[in-house]
Image: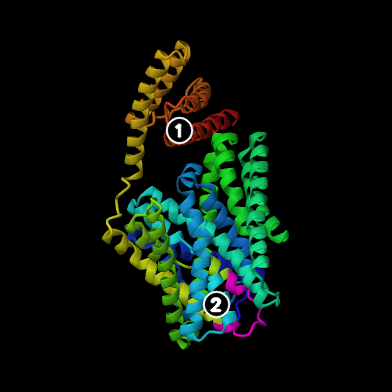
Amino acid sequence: MPIASMTGSTAGIAEALVLLLIIASAVAVVARRVGVPYTIGLVLVGLAVGLAAHVETLRLSSDLVFYVFLPILLFEAAFYLEARHLRDQWRRILALAVPGVLVAFALTALGVHLLGGVAWSLALLFGALIAATDPVSVVSLFHRLGVSERLTTLVDAESLFNDGAAAVLFAIVLAVVVDGHAFTAGWAAGKFVWMAAGGLVVGLVVGYGASFVHRHLDDHLIEITLSTIVAYGSFLLGQTLGMSGVVACVSAAIVLGNLGRRRTMGPVTRVTMSTVWEYAAFVANSLIFLLIGLSMHLSLIAEHVGLVLIAFLVVVVARAVTIYGYGLIARLLGAGLPFRWQHVLVWGGLRGTIALALVLSVPAAVSGRATLEVVTFGVVLLSLVGQGLTMPWLTRRLGLEGQEQSVSRRRREVLLEGFVSAHVELDRLQEAGDVPRPERQHLERTIEEEENELLEGMAPIAEEPGAGEDDRLAERIGALVAQRPRIEALRRAGAVDEAVTAALLDELDHRVALLGERLAGERGQGVT
């Protein structure tokens, strides 16, 4: 089943891209109306288009997925992972991402070898490449249904880190199976540590370096360009040095997202960057899931349907053993994982982008490579459609829907709780003599201003320009910017927690960006 990345003329490729984006936009609109994850809708539409018309202009290839799409998806997902959430669940994430991947790999390879009669070399390759999960559809569903933020973070973070572990594991297996490298436990462990730890170091260096550079920039276009360099640069640097580009990209994005975005980027940059990367991820996901559908040869999958079904069942069972086994161990150690969460982690462990990128990277000379590719595509199809479409039912059945109230309502409640706590804490700090009266007045005023904005909504901006309108806008921007250090002071004093601080600062950024656009427009009208 040969699959090339791009064929045909440049004009033909451009036409195909435009057509795919039109289809993706239409599918996204329909999917949101009917409540189906749009990525799954894209796969189904891609299958239908592939059956109706033979499309060869754009096809999946390892390089297209690995070096074009993957850095975008990894960076965008990791950039918005909050450090406080990672600190809260790092033991679970690490356990599922490393030992969990190794256990799933071993069980999957053993299962397809014994039950499917697959040769050991192909079974080991399949076990390694299929260990990576792809939660794009699940996470978007969770946000729509209001599933617990902690569960959503666990699913998202575990996937990002097990992507890295699976990619490293696959590289080791490929070196043994294809290159004939002699396998020893010491060599495999050393290779794993070199690729994973090395990728982590590369990502940390790139992320901290970029955050430092952002501190000295004040141009959102340049800073967004720098973030693109970080995404692709960390990935490519890790791959070039023989380390894990996946781990490097994820770690760089986490550092830049938590250090650079929160502390060194200006408000306009933060708001603009959020929009740009959200759009980039939407386009990448749209194209890749459409191409997945277009690239699947259902006739070949049907020829191997028995093996595909066995492989899919083995993958699900291996995932179940991993999750429930970890849940049992965690419970014995006094850090149990809720049973309802375990069910969701098992059935929500969809397979997708990473698995396809890895199977497409297997050299054509490998015996049985075509069968490996067909089985992988079949398992990915069953996973996305079968598991993905039933996740809403499972989530509702387990009573997880609506655990988190609507975003705006929940945010307002959290902030109001924070404001009440802040008032109480300020009283205590002043009584203890830790906060001088002038500073107390400034902080009190900040809290009251934010509280009024929250209760009454954003104050409307005058629609009709008048004399001195740009001065008033500039003053208001200055007043908002001045609130930032005061809110940070509240956090340092313990008056508000990190969640409330982050929400307040995000709100300030959006208001400053909005006023900045209005100010630029007023001044532009003055020039003309």
Among all residues in the image, which is located at the extreme bottom? 303
Percent across and percent down for residue 5 are 62, 72
Q: Is residue 528 left or right of residue 435?
A: right
Percent across and percent down for residue 242 are 71, 61
Crowd band around label 2 with a 10 angstrom C-alpha radius: few (<14), some (14–19), many (20+): few
Percent across and percent down for residue 258 are 55, 41
Q: Is residue 352 left or right of residue 253?
A: left
Res 53 seen here: no
Q: Residue at x 55, y 79 (%)?
A: 123
Q: Please identify the quadrant where the C terminus is shown.
A: top right
Q: Which residue is mark 1?
A: 501
At label 1, the amino acid type is: Thr
Q: Is residue 167 left or right of residue 318?
A: right
Of the residues under marks 2 and 1, which one precedes in the sequence?
A: 2
Quadrant of residue 248 within the rendered picture: bottom right
In the picture shown, does residue 68 fall above or below 316?
A: above
Q: Please identify the quadrant where the N terminus is shown.
A: bottom right
* Highlighted magenta segment, given as a residue range: 358-371
Among all residues in the image, which is located at the extreme top? 437
Q: Which residue is mark 2?
A: 55
At label 2, the amino acid type is: Val
Callout 2: helix, strand or loop? loop
In the picture shown, does residue 455 fall above or below 193?
A: above
**Disc 2 to disc 1, C-alpha distance:** 50 Å
Res 380 seen here: yes
| The magenta stretch spans residue 277 | no
Percent across and percent down for residue 289 are 49, 67
